[in-house]
Amino acid sequence: MNRILLISGSTRDGSTNTAALRTVAAFAPADVRADLYDGLRELPAFVPGEDPDDYPAVAALRAELAAADAVLFCTPEYAGTLPGSMKNLLDWTVGTGDLYGKPIAWLTVAVPGRGEGAVATLSTVLGYVGAEVVERACARLPVLGAEVDADGLVGDPEFRARASAVLAALSDHLAARLEA
């Protein structure tokens, strides 16, 4: 079974990004264990040269990344780029190699015309840390706040099917790596 870590770049309660990832986890294919990372708010500000393992929240993040076969990000765009909290999470991985060679993808839930700055920055940082971007698993699946049910999941069946296909594409990529 493949374990895929789901990381939302939003710290906002009621976030459509987090709701999208909760939905991804709830409707994951049978061969995928999808776990939602929930420690973004607890991460301290990145300080170059500090030992990441001196900070329990950073050590926990690193353990989650190490246990994951792949990572799926879903992040909003703030002021044309990644939210500071998401960039901070990524900054903690720069010197540690936690994402080096790790297959990753992203899901963009912003409406067309929004979110491109966040995706561009995420792509740049992931390239810098040596992550393996699985392009065929990256998708834009817009979600409006009204589409999130009371249970915190996206209710649209088409979204659920397409989001499940994103995880399947990551899982297929992992299987192909094992065969190679």
Image (cartoon, rainbow, N blue to C red):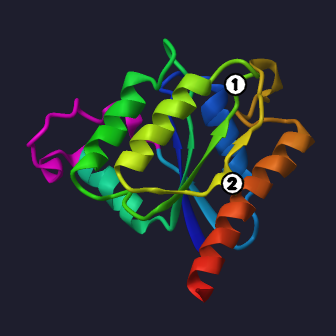
Whole-percent x, y for residue 73 in the image? 55, 44
Q: Report x, y in % for residue 81.
A: 48, 22
Q: Is residue 39 magenta?
A: yes
Q: Secondary structure at mark 2?
A: helix
Residue 29, located in which quarter of the rendered image? bottom right
- Residue at image position (27%, 43%) is 92
How many dots with numbers? 2
Foreground: 125 or 162?
125
Name which residue lies at 45% across and 63% down.
Answer: 102
Q: Position of residue 43 (x, y in %)?
A: 29, 36
- Which residue type carries mark 2? Ala
Q: In the rendered view, does 91 fall on the left or right side of 5?
A: left
> Residue 169, how many percent across, how many down?
72, 62
Q: Nearer the viewer, residue 150 or 51?
A: 51
- Residue that lies at the very extreme toward the top in this rendered image: 79
Is residue 156 placed above or below 168 in the rendered structure?
A: above
Which quarter of the rendered picture does the N terminus lie within? bottom right
| Residue denoted by label 1 | 110
| Disc on res. 137 | 2
What span is colored magenta in the figure?
A: 38-57
Label number found at residue 147 = none
Q: On the rendered image, what quadrant is the C terminus found in?
A: bottom right
Q: Is residue 79 left or right of residue 176?
A: left
Q: Is residue 1 depicted above or below 55 in this figure?
A: below
User: What's the residue type where badge 1 is placed?
Assistant: Ala
The reply to whether residue 27 is visible in this rendering is: no
Residue 154 relative to residue 70: left or right: right
Query: Residue 25 or 117: which is nearer the viewer?
Result: 117
Q: Earlier in the sequence, mark 2 or mark 1?
A: 1
Q: Is residue 135 visible?
A: yes
